[in-house]
Image (spheres, helix red, strand yellow):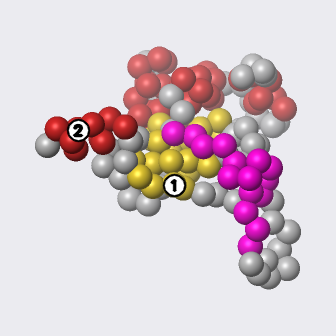
Amino acid sequence: MTSTHAELLRAADLRVTAPRLAVLAEVEAHPHATAETIRQAVRDRLGTVSTQAVYDVLHALTDARILRRIEPDGSPGRFELYRGDNHHHVVCRRCGAISDVPCAVGEAPCLHASDDHGFTIEAAEVIYWGTCPECQLARTGD
């Protein structure tokens, strides 16, 4: 990441606080983590921090487009740093592992709607579903 977490917060006109810095550090270290995973990691890092405080930080950072929330079907919301690169995701149907996939065409919005209904399309979210290499190996061993 080229900017510090404090610089990201300031650029979004958000106060620099220990919970916000801790959430950013955990999301950067563990992309695609759930809110609960982030909450526990922040609590381990800071000691006492309320669940509501972590959820409030996640919401504020997502609203400020510092974080991106993705919601694969059947999975709790996952968080990653917002990079503005319009990348996509591949999700394992067996274990839920998630990985980034570059834009399908190379530049946003990657896909073009057959009827945009007058909207200016800025981004497309694509989730590829399949079976990860580890689950493929486990399946052959069944």
Q: Is residue 35 left or right of residue 131?
A: right
Residue 54 on image: x %, y %: 52, 36
Q: Secondary structure at mark 2?
A: helix
Q: Which mark is residue 108?
A: none
Q: Nearer the viewer, residue 56 or 89?
A: 89
Q: Answer whether residue 101 is magenta in the image.
A: yes
Report the residue at 80% width, 49% height from top: 107
**Above-or-below relation of 46 to 129:** above
Image side of residue 45 versus residue 81, left or right: left
The answer to whether residue 51 is visible is no
Quarter of the image that includes the N terminus: top right
Amino acid type at mark 1? Tyr
Q: Nearer the viewer, residue 128 or 48?
A: 128
Query: Closer to the camera, 122 or 10?
Result: 122
Please state the total of marks drawn on the protein image: 2
Asked if the stretch drawn in magenta spans residue 29, the answer is: no
Q: Which residues are magenta?
A: 99-113
Residue 1 vertical placement versus 81 (above, below): above
Q: Is residue 134 left or right of residue 54?
A: left
Give yes or no for contact between labels 2 and 1 (Cβ–Cβ under 8 Å): no
- Quadrant hosting residue 118: bottom right
Residue plotted at (51% across, 55% down): 128
Circle 1 sits in a helix, a strand or a loop, which is it? strand
Q: At 36% from the left edge and 52% from the top edge, which residue is drawn?
A: 93
Residue under pointer 1: 128
Q: Is residue 41 above or below residue 93?
A: above
Residue 138 is labelled as 2
Residue occupying image coordinates x 47% and y 17%: 45
Mark 2 and mark 1: span between their CA atoms? 20 Å
- Please tell me how crowded label 2 is: few (under 14), some (14-19), or many (20+) other residues with Cα within 10 Å: few
